[in-house]
Amino acid sequence: MFDLPEEILVCLDELSETYGVGKNVSKNYSELSENYRNKSFKELNFPQAIAYAQGRMPATYSVIKYVLERFKNIGKNFSNILDVGAGVGALKIALRDCEVNYEAVEKSEAMRKVFRKLNGEDVKICSDDFRKFCCKNRYEAVFASYFVNEIKDKKSVLKKIFALAEKYVFILEPGTPNGYKNILEAKNLATELGWYPLLPCATQSCKLLEKDWCHFSIRLARTRRHASLKNATLRYEDEKFCYVIFSKKETKFENNNTIIKKPIKKSGHIIFDVCTGNGIQRVVRTDKASKKLQWGDQL
């Protein structure tokens, strides 16, 4: 599990109490969830941004840490990054122990305010709408987490993301069929622009059947407040997500063998659905080492 640092959780609780939203935080979060389901992405006020941070950041932080860990495991790194649609700063928190020059774009004033409360006042955050964002710099990596899903002119925004990146582009989306469509759109555009999938893909064009979608899952612990906020009884939740990392240099992505579904454990053997250079394959393993492999791992 990749849990939010304890000091961040404490800071969120203090924000909730200090600004008088403690009693209304569940209501604010319920309204946000309903708006999100209806694709009504309205400007948030400060109490709503705090509710969003308490309700969603444990999951988005866990997903970001998971993806960064996968990236690190293949020996890759970057020295500077642009965080597009940075929200309340989950990526910044995930990178707090790394020597990385971090810059962000976030148009919501309320989100930026929570961001600074959690990460300090000295972080460089541009307040522009990303579509109007004007920057002569380029970044080794550009990161867009749960961002593409919220915009209409996806292709033009994705083009801008690729144009600002020198080495890597990270796209993270909800683990839904619609989120997966956004990943496919990014993959198709990347091919047009001469970029290559690095993870988790084993092919440049997706080989899944039309009615299926590639996504992953990560389990995270719920704090008592987090569970209360969502009216949940379980002390954990499973966050479903899609992601793709692109590289400007041609990669050996075809050597990937990513487990794309939850392994099916039988008596004496385990069944894996694997994305390989030869398409989607079902693999049966009987060795003890395979028992430790999980959804999203390399076979």
Image: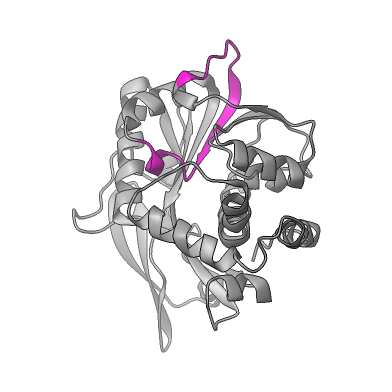
> In the image, 47: left or right of 259?
right
Q: Residue at x 34, y 32 (%)?
A: 154
Image coordinates of residue 155 in percent, x first then y, are: 32, 28
Q: Residue at x 57, y 62 (%)?
A: 55
Magenta residues, as a range? 132-151
Q: Quadrant of residue 101?
A: top right
Q: Residue at x 39, y 23 (%)?
A: 159
Q: Quadrant of residue 221?
A: bottom right
> Where 40 sits versus 83, above or below?
below
Magenta highlight on residue 197: no
Colouring method of the image? one colour
Q: Residue at x 78, y 60 (%)?
A: 14
The foreground one among 233 and 240 is: 233
> In the image, 151: left or right of 89?
left
Image coordinates of residue 80 in percent, x first then y, are: 68, 27
> Where 54 sits versus 106, above or below?
below
The foreground one among 169 and 258 is: 169
Magenta highlight on residue 143: yes
- Report if residue 223 is visible in the image: no
> In the image, 34: left or right of 223?
left
Most extreme residue toward the left is 210
Image coordinates of residue 265 in percent, x first then y, are: 42, 81
| Quadrant location, the N terminus | bottom right
The foreground one among 168 and 291 is: 168
